[in-house]
Amino acid sequence: MKLVSIVVPCYNEQEVLPLFYDEIIKVTDSMKAEFSELEFEFLFINDGSKDKTLEIFRSLADKDKRVRYVSFSRNFGKESGMYAGLKNAKGDFVVVMDADLQHPPAFLPEMYRFVRDGEYDCATTRRVSRKGESKIRSWFARKFYQIMNKISQTEIVDGAQDFRFMTRQMVDSILEMSEYNRFSKGIFSWVGFNVKYIEYENVERAAGTTAWSFWGLFKYSLEGIMAFSTAPLAISSLLGIVSCIIAFILILVTVIKTLAFGEDVAGYPTTLCVIFLLSGLQLFCTGILGQYLSKTYLETKNRPIYIAKETDELYRNRKKSAEESKDASDKE
Ligand code: UDP
Ligand code: MG
């Protein structure tokens, strides 16, 4: 038998979770009929939701023993959610997908066929359109992938998503990357392996709202660049070199001018310009250095990527012992 773990990070997903569960049960049941070797577990991650997400997990765990969950002590972000999922998954294959049905479960059988025979280590979807997304957002996204692929050795495919069907071997490699600043798109690509991209049209969220603001995404893309490229550090040295050359030429010009025409005090505006330009460049470069330093600082602290407050195991044990003590008191 082969176990497939389906990992689903959730943040405030009470509206869509029941829909998701129905859908995933439908698809996995039909997969069991088609591939008799498969078994499933559903591993939900509650990323510090403020709504009824955890209550829904508990009631799913009550009625379906294949449902497992990990609930965080606060919101750690989707990256931490995915990490926790991969870490706790027991399967021979692990699927990571969103709860909002933007990653259609109907793709799972096709994905499984690609990884089953070992030809591919990972099957994933790639959206070819960004239907339902604002124009500015798609423009920034496209630019991000262009810049990222120019300045980083790690190739990141435009439209690639965190919807993945992976083998145990690939999951273990991903878990070995225990960095604190996690940028999954880079991590998935960095570990290599054979990846099959299945193209599809973008699907809009089934219910609820996205947790990503434009500003949040922008910050996330900068994180991605910093995590997988040191090119910005090179930019700062380049800027330094360029400004040194300019300064050298200016000095030369001033010396020649003074020798030829004598001295006058008419140089204030140019002096000011040069001071502003150079101190600006210096601050810019120090800023870039500071950004990398702050990331290094966070890494060296070795903080945990997530903190679990409750798991299905804890919940089930607690329930069992409550029932036992109730039975005992009934007998008395
Ligand atoms: N998510 C999460 N933690 C967060 C934000 C989002 O676990 O802090 C989950 C969310 O519940 C969903 C997935 O990540 O299952 C994708 O989120 P969303 O649909 O909001 O993002 P989008 O599809 O707009 O990129
Ligand atoms: Mg979504």
Image (tube, rainbow, N blue to C red):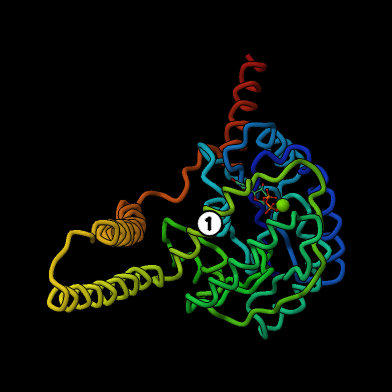
Which corner quadrant holds the N terminus? Answer: bottom right
Q: Position of residue 28 (x, y in %)?
A: 81, 60
Q: Position of residue 244 (x, y in %)?
A: 25, 73
**Is residue 46 left or right of 110 when viewed as pictured?**
left
| Residue extending farthest front | 261
At 69% from the left and 63% from the top, the residue drawn is 163
| Residue extending farthest bottom | 119
Q: Residues within 10 Å of mark 1 (few under 14, many from 20)?
A: many
Identify which residue, 89 or 122, lies in the foreground. 122
How many numbered marks have been drawn onto this rendered protein structure? 1
| Residue 289 visible at all | no
At 70% from the left and 54% from the top, the residue drawn is 98
At 57% from the left and 38% from the top, the residue drawn is 48
Vertical placement of residue 106 versus 304, above or below: below
Identify which residue, 103 or 92, lies in the foreground. 103
Q: Amino acid at mark 1?
A: Tyr
At 13% from the left and 71% from the top, the residue drawn is 262
Q: Quadrant of residue 33?
A: bottom right
Q: Position of residue 78 (x, y in %)?
A: 58, 51
**Is residue 290 left or right of 8 when viewed as pictured?**
left
Which corner quadrant holds the C terminus? Answer: top right
Q: Quadrant of residue 109?
A: bottom right
**Is residue 170 left or right of 180 when viewed as pictured?**
right
- Label 1, secondary structure: give it: helix
Identify which residue, 167 or 217, lies in the foreground. 217
Q: Which residue is mark 1?
A: 83
